[in-house]
Amino acid sequence: MTIRYPNGKAYRQPSAAKATRSKFANVNFGDRGMSLEEELNASNTYYLENGIAVIHKKPTPIQIVKVDYPSRSAAVIREAYFQHASTTDYNGVYRGKYLDFEAKETKSKTAFPLKNFHEHQIEHMRQCLQQGGICFVIIRFAVLERLFLLRATDLNSYWDRQATGGRKSIPLADVEQLATEIHYHINPLIPYLDAVDLIMDAPSSSH
Amino acid sequence: MTIRYPNGKAYRQPSAAKATRSKFANVNFGDRGMSLEEELNASNTYYLENGIAVIHKKPTPIQIVKVDYPSRSAAVIREAYFQHASTTDYNGVYRGKYLDFEAKETKSKTAFPLKNFHEHQIEHMRQCLQQGGICFVIIRFAVLERLFLLRATDLNSYWDRQATGGRKSIPLADVEQLATEIHYHINPLIPYLDAVDLIMDAPSSSH
């Protein structure tokens, strides 16, 4: 039997999960001024401080051309250039395993463009997979405010098919089917290790 | 029975290991112009290209203050400062395990000064050990041209004893006893993963 409010709207027993989610129903995370990188850094700090995992973002590689050494002060870099990283941005250790991932977002509402990734990042994840690492990408559909963790093995299939005339993006429907959706939380903000647990605890895990 | 050369010197059957070492007997690696960092980077490239391990040096973290965007050219960093890293310099994946290490050298001939390491590096290795990572330091006595791999757990003991009046360095004799000596080779130049194998394959490994 459905219990109804005086206004006719059906009453539903709030579950703990729903309560948590509803708390965030009116919060637009995308507009809070935090980038995906900042949100992941905050999450990694939470994981570190609670002894759950040690995961850091790597510094951006920079080619330094000229450095000044003013007397009595720190060295000042006066000419330098951004370089392309030869690896992904994040790595670390969790539950005895090596974790390696990249985080990217798109404004598209229908598909995740593969051009967000670079050949050397794909290659790096392949190398890490060969060594038994756990590799994945965290992708955000910014407009939809939806976050997913997609295994590198699944990403690789789409990447390779590009070369033989395959499409240049992963349709949202495919992402929904292959990836694990991550819902924003408080601590950590992005609880992506829950999705990593699913990979690690899968019966026939190929990571 | 000892077989002797006509000059009276005893003949010894050369083992494969000795043959390798003698090949380098007259090579002064310390003067070849390569820093320990460059030697390790070359070794990591060898390991990577041969599908043995994926280990990279992290870029130096830099705080960027001012960037110019000249038309039609790449962004130029005009003011930036070196920052202290919050982790060790090297990490990666080998045989399914997370590896994390720092490399340092000393000119001392008698002991390795602990001031070569920073509190945050020690703390980072402790955190990684807790997650089941394999953590160590590669230390070089530059004048003696001797290289060792010392486990983070052993380094930690000396580090902690400093606070209660212990000595500020690890005597060479202790290093010889606790650490694994690494001999220079051709490919890779510094075959430190052989020493890591000893840690990983130890019967009661605490890493």
Image (spheres, coloured by chain):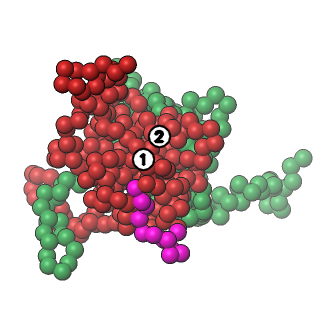
Chain colours: A red, B green
- On screen, residue A159 versus residue A29, left or right, reads right
Q: Which of the two discs, 2 and 1, labels the residue nearer the N terminus?
A: 1
Q: Position of residue A77 (x, y in %)?
A: 18, 62
Q: In which quadrant of the rendered image does the N terminus of chain A lie?
A: top left
Amino acid type at image mark 2 = Val
Q: Position of residue B109 (x, y in %)?
A: 45, 45
Tally of numbered tags: 2
Q: Quadrant of residue B88?
A: top left
Residue at x-position 87% and y-position 54%: B3
Q: Chain of mark 1?
A: A
- On screen, residue B207 versus residue A50, left or right, reads right
Q: Is residue B43 above or below residue B90?
A: below
* Label of residue B61 in the image: none
- Which residue lies under the disc numbered 1? A149
- Which residue lies under the disc numbered 2? A196
For the magenta stretch, what is the residue range?
Answer: A161-172
Q: Position of residue A56 (x, y in %)?
A: 35, 44
Do the numbered discs 2 and 1 sit on residues whose CB atoms are within 8 Å? yes
